Image: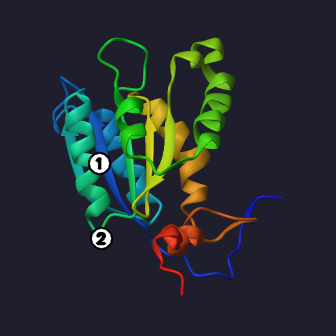
């Protein structure tokens, strides 16, 4: 049964929050603020927070900067995952992924289906890894951010979560770069 192992010490994770929007500012970014609040409420640290426009080159550039930043363990974005012409977040993320975490999007849509029904097909939430950094893209509503954080990421980024979690894999994310012999 999934559970928190209270015998293990909690290890906070450094997280960057990226809002993808043509219209939001820090003053009216309710989804980015919701993520910021939930992340800090649960003991993690928001080390970076930015807003970029719905343009692949801008999103890719920001992701690459944070992937290269040794202070950033995880990037969580909000916005740009829909199906309209300006929604390009999944395409940008897929340009930097080394490995995709298919189960993240699948699980997010399963959770979302229970709340919004078939409207969940409009979500293209994605997750993956690049440069030893986890990358997750959530839809742009505060409720979608709550679902993604409270139902998935809160547990997978808690090293005490059992039977397993993504945090305990962090030291091994770049094994493929180690030279043999």
* Mark linked to residue 63: 1
Which residue bears the numbered disc 2? Answer: 70
Residue visible at 29% across and 43% down? 18
Badge 1, how many Cα within 10 Å: few under 14, some, many 20+? many
Location of residue 138 in the rendering, given as x and y in whole percent from the top left corner: 45, 35
Q: Nearer the viewer, residue 172 or 108?
A: 172
Q: Is residue 79 visible?
A: no
Residue visible at 43% across and 19% down? 82
Q: Nearer the viewer, residue 14 or 40?
A: 14
Q: Is residue 132 above or below residue 99?
A: below
Q: Mark 2 or mark 1, which is nearer the start of the sequence? A: 1
Badge 2, how many Cα within 10 Å: few under 14, some, many 20+? few
The picture quadrant where one finds residue 107 is top right
The picture quadrant where one finds residue 59 is top left
Residue visible at 43% across and 64% down? 132
Location of residue 54 in the rendering, given as x and y in whole percent from the top left corner: 24, 26
How many badges with numbers are in the image?
Answer: 2
The C terminus: image quadrant: bottom right
Task: Give the residue at the far front of this rendering.
Answer: 181
Residue visible at 51% across and 23% down? 123
Q: Is residue 55 visible?
A: yes
Q: Secondary structure at mark 1?
A: helix
Q: Is residue 104 above or below residue 86?
A: below
**Callouts 1 and 2 close, C-beta under 8 Å:** no
The N terminus: image quadrant: bottom right
Task: Give the residue at the far bottom of this rendering.
Answer: 181
Q: Is residue 160 left or right of residue 53?
A: right
Colour basis: rainbow
* Mark linked to residue 12: none
Location of residue 168 in the rendering, given as x and y in whole percent from the top left corner: 59, 71
């Amino acid at each position: 049964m999934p559970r928190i192992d209270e015998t293990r010490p909690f290890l906070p994770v450094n997280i960057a929050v990226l809002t993808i929007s043509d219209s939001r500012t820090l003053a009216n970014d309710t989804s980015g603020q919701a993520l910021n609040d939930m992340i800090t409420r649960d003991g993690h640290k928001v080390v970076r927070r930015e807003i970029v426009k719905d343009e692949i080159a801008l999103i890719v550039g920001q992701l690459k900067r944070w992937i290269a930043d040794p202070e950033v363990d995880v990037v969580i974005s909000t916005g740009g995952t829909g199906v309209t012409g300006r929604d390009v977040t999944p395409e940008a993320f897929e340009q930097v992924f080394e490995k995709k975490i298919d189960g993240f999007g699948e699980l997010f849509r399963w959770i979302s289906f229970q709340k919004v029904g078939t409207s969940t097909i409009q979500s293209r939430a994605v997750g993956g890894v690049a440069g030893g950094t986890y990358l997750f893209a959530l839809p742009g509503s505060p409720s979608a951010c709550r679902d993604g954080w409270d139902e998935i990421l809160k547990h997978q980024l808690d090293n005490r979560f059992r039977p397993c979690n993504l945090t305990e894999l962090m030291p091994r994310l770049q094994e493929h770069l180690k030279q043999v012999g």
